[in-house]
Amino acid sequence: MLSEFIAANGVFAVKVAVATGILIWAVIEDLRSRKFSNRSFLISCAIALLTSIALGSGSNLSSEIISATLGFGAGLVFFLPLVLAGVIGAGDMKLMAAFGILVGWHAVLWTGVYGLVWGAVFGVIQIIVRGELRGLKENLTTLAITRSKGNMQLHRIPFTAPLLLGWLSHLVATGAFR
């Protein structure tokens, strides 16, 4: 049955389906517990790696392993500065590393860029819904004048949701849904 699906839809479709499934799983876990656990990270890595190896049989296996390694590394390298700056949590970085095993470094970077845009949109919506526009203005003024965070109140959102939307935006932008 799986071989029939792969034959009909191709390796790319299987990778997209598994990668999207991992992101959906992460969103559900993030909404429930406000984190992406180490256990989920390890399971996601195993699923992604096994899928990549299974789909990259024969002479294509070595290029599949290189792509998986670069994707994993991109998830760590691109998102580490965001973790250190307190923009996202370490679980989001680990999620993108596991996700990168399947989709490669290029998709990790674009998913991250689109995810940051979606995260900003979610943050602004959260501020508007909570009626905290004045606080946003004060925070932006403080940043512009002092170039320091000071004692600003930061808004937290489950960032896995913007990452999922970033992935879907990347797929649309690359024409994967044609």
Image (cartoon, rainbow, N blue to C red):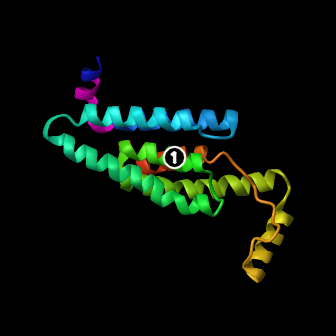
Q: Residue at x 83, y 67 (%)?
A: 151
- Left or right of 99? Residue 67 is left
Q: Quadrant of the C terminus?
A: top left
Q: Residue at x 33, y 46 (%)?
A: 68
Q: Is residue 139 above or below residue 7?
A: below
Q: Amino acid at mark 1?
A: Lys
Is 79 contained in the magenta span? no
Q: Residues within 10 Å of mark 1 (few under 14, many from 20)?
A: many
- Picture quarter with the N terminus: top left
Which residue appears farthest toward the top when viewing the image?
1
Tell me the SS state at disc 1: helix
Quarter of image, res 25: top right
Task: Name which residue lies at 59% across and 44% down.
Answer: 160
Residue 34 coordinates in the image, percent (x, y): 68, 40
Instruction: Give the extent of the magenta segment.
Output: 5-14
Q: Is residue 72 left or right of residue 61?
A: right
Closest to the observer: 101 or 114? 101
Residue found at the far bottom of this picture: 145
Q: Position of residue 136 (x, y in %)?
A: 80, 65
Task: Please say whether residue 10 is one of the residues in the magenta stretch.
Answer: yes
Q: Which residue is mark 1?
A: 94
Res 13 quadrant in image: top left
